[in-house]
Amino acid sequence: MAYINENFLKLQHRYLFAEIAKRVAAYKAENPQADIIRLGIGDVTQPLAPAVVEAMHRAVDECANGETFRGYGPEHGYNFLIEAIIAHDFEPRGVHLTPDEVFISDGAKSDTGNIGDILSSANVIGVTDPVYPVYVDTNTMGGRDIRYIPCNEANGFTGDIPAEKLDVVYLCFPNNPTGAVITREGLQRWVDYALRNDCLILYDAAYEAFISDAAIPHSIYEIEGAKQCAIEFRSFSKTAGFTGVRCGYTIIPNELKVNSLSGERVALNGIWDRRQCSKFNGASYISQRGAEAVFSAEGQKQIRATIDYYMANARIIRQSLQGFGLQVFGGENAPYIWVRTPNGTDSWSFFDRLLREAQVVTTPGAGFGAAGEGYIRITAFGTHKSSIEAMDRVKKCL
Ligand code: MLT
């Protein structure tokens, strides 16, 4: 007889963004003429940079030729991409990595969830609240106990260091959903906590490219001691428009070790490598060539222009909402704007109101956890035109 993994029965009925998509589809079915502006799920609107497109075309041509065709790639990813990542994203910040510490993947979402495969189901997991739902859902699937670390206006949405000993803590900065960033000192406090308590930090840096303030760290490895306690996840999705193409990477330093039941210290790098070899066949050669082109001089110029474009949207959204008298957070070093709902309206009601009265899709804060109640999240990934139009419509329904 087959049995279900009971942990799946503990999940909320639908993944947050699937629930939103369902509500929007139902509204659209009732109102086929509605001109809906989607500032909910952080899907990008700007096309791939020309340098990326050219590189991917070349890669397709190589695969069309028997002499240059590529089949299965190396499990860690191609060296051309790994070396570009190290040289561009880490060396200039004084972070020295060896190629075997970088694992190319199909994105940070899958890696932040899949990493649970190599961690005991007995680990107690800490997540900041509000939280990117993937961390909660995948650890619920894995049968782990989850503790919530409240992030609020009082602590700048960065969470206070917990009094209890947690085994694993997920951190995400710049934060999804609040758009909060963490200072070097703030991040050092988390690293010190992890080192003191033999805790593993899972650091999601998917939005680091949106940081413009030079004082804000891009990588946790800029912090002393982090290589002994942290894994870092990165993504090309929002940085370079890869939400559909799929490519990201995960750093597992060689010196990072955790306990086995027999009391041995085991290096996670080798265990993740073992997992990837059995369960993953890599991001496609074509995606990896596209990702490599992000680091070319042309690619850098082009993706910078796109990030600036999104951050101009963030400014429009922030300033407009502030002008309407709303309390607004984030959106300065992050593409997410976190907005207090007016007059204490609950977040799903405000989401529904904006959908029905303004035809603007947002994300209700409560979907990210209890501490998200009373907020909504708006993304800066629309177009200038849609961001301005959305603000005009929101104003009318306040
Ligand atoms: C979001 O809207 O939170 C993200 O786009 C979702 C994701 O990256 O998976």
Image: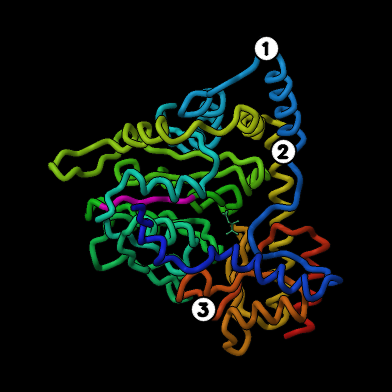
**Segment colored magenta:** 199-204
Q: Which mark is residue 301?
A: 2
Q: How many marks?
A: 3
- Residue at 40% in and 32% down: 278
Q: Residues within 10 Å of mark 2 (few under 14, many from 20)?
A: some
Q: CA distance from mark 2 to mark 3?
A: 39 Å
- Residue at 72% in and 85% down: 398
Q: Dot 3: what SS?
A: loop
Q: Residues within 10 Å of mark 1 (few under 14, many from 20)?
A: few
Residue 20, relative to residue 236: is it above or below? below
The residue sitting at the front extreme is 1
**Nearest-to-viewer mark from 2 and 1:** 1
Dot 2 and dot 1 residues touching (CB under 8 Å): no
Q: Is residue 303 left or right of residue 135?
A: right
Q: Is residue 229 left or right of residue 214?
A: left
**Nearest-to-viewer mark from 1 and 3:** 1
Q: Three-letter amino acid code at disc 2?
A: Lys
- Residue at 27% in and 53% down: 199
Q: Which residue is mark 3?
A: 373
Q: Three-letter amino acid code at disc 1?
A: Gly
Report ligand 1 position as a quadrant. bottom right
Q: Dot 1: what SS?
A: loop
Q: Which mark is residue 297?
A: none
Q: Residues within 10 Å of mark 3 (few under 14, many from 20)?
A: many
Q: Nearer the viewer, residue 81 or 223?
A: 81
Residue 99, relative to residue 219: is it above or below? above
Q: Characterize the magenta stretch by its predominant secondary structure.
A: strand
- Residue at 74% in and 66% down: 316
The residue sitting at the top extreme is 67
Dot 1 and dot 3 residues touching (CB under 8 Å): no
Mark with earlier residue (2, 3): 2
Q: Which residue is mark 1?
A: 66
